[in-house]
Amino acid sequence: MELATREDIEAPIDFVFEQITDFATFERSIMRRGGDVERLSGDATAAVGTSWQVKFMLRGAERHAKAEIVEIDRPGMLVLAVTSKNADADMKIELVPLSRARTRINIRAEATAKTIPAKLFFQSLKFARQKTQARFKSVVANFAEDVEAKYRA
């Protein structure tokens, strides 16, 4: 299953990169939604090998996943690998400077199922592809709006 979207952000590329690598904010966001995040390695800066163990509820069951930064090219790219018992996913975030004060963010997420239940779950997402893609685009658009608001402030 693959999802991709892009948004233009009214902020310089360095500022946008700082926001996508503000892991403490993402950790707090996950905890506010009822998940549990534990940083396994790395510090506050983005570096290859930084990893997290995440627990969250999905479809009535507690799920466990490990996320790790596998590639970083400051300030243009960040690649995360997420592994769990049922599925694996890769997320590639690319930043393209459009001008000094405008940046395009391209996000591509690709997930593969390891088990039959995960394959069925991904199949249900594929049947509702437009809705799934719209939800993904909405999340990225909200993030872009938040980054713009922080930059203006």
Image (cartoon, rainbow, N blue to C red):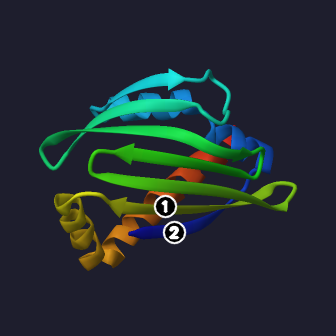
Q: Nearer the viewer, residue 136 or 49?
A: 49
Q: Earlier in the sequence, mark 1 or mark 2?
A: 2
Q: In the rendered structure, are the residues bearing label 1 and label 2 in contact, judged by CB atoms less than 8 Å apart? A: yes
Image quarter hosting the C terminus: top right
| 115 to the left or right of 21 | left
Q: Nearer the viewer, residue 146 or 84?
A: 84
The vertical placement of 70 against 131, above or below, is above
Q: Residue visible at 21% across and 71% down?
A: 124
Q: Secondary structure at mark 1?
A: strand
Q: Secondary structure at mark 2?
A: strand
Q: Residue visible at 39% across and 45% down?
A: 83
Question: Disc 1 marks which amino acid?
Answer: Ala
Question: Disc 2 marks which amino acid?
Answer: Ala
Q: Residue 77 placed where, x, y %?
A: 70, 52
Quarter residue 130 falls in: bottom left
Q: In this figure, which residue is indicated by the disc labeled 1?
A: 109
| 121 to the left or right of 153 | left
The total of numbered circles placed on residues is 2
Residue 52 seen in this snapshot: yes
Q: Residue 96 placed where, x, y %?
A: 76, 61
Image quarter hosting the N terminus: bottom left
Quarter residue 34 falls in: top left
Q: Nearer the viewer, residue 61 or 99?
A: 61
Mark number for residue 4? Answer: 2
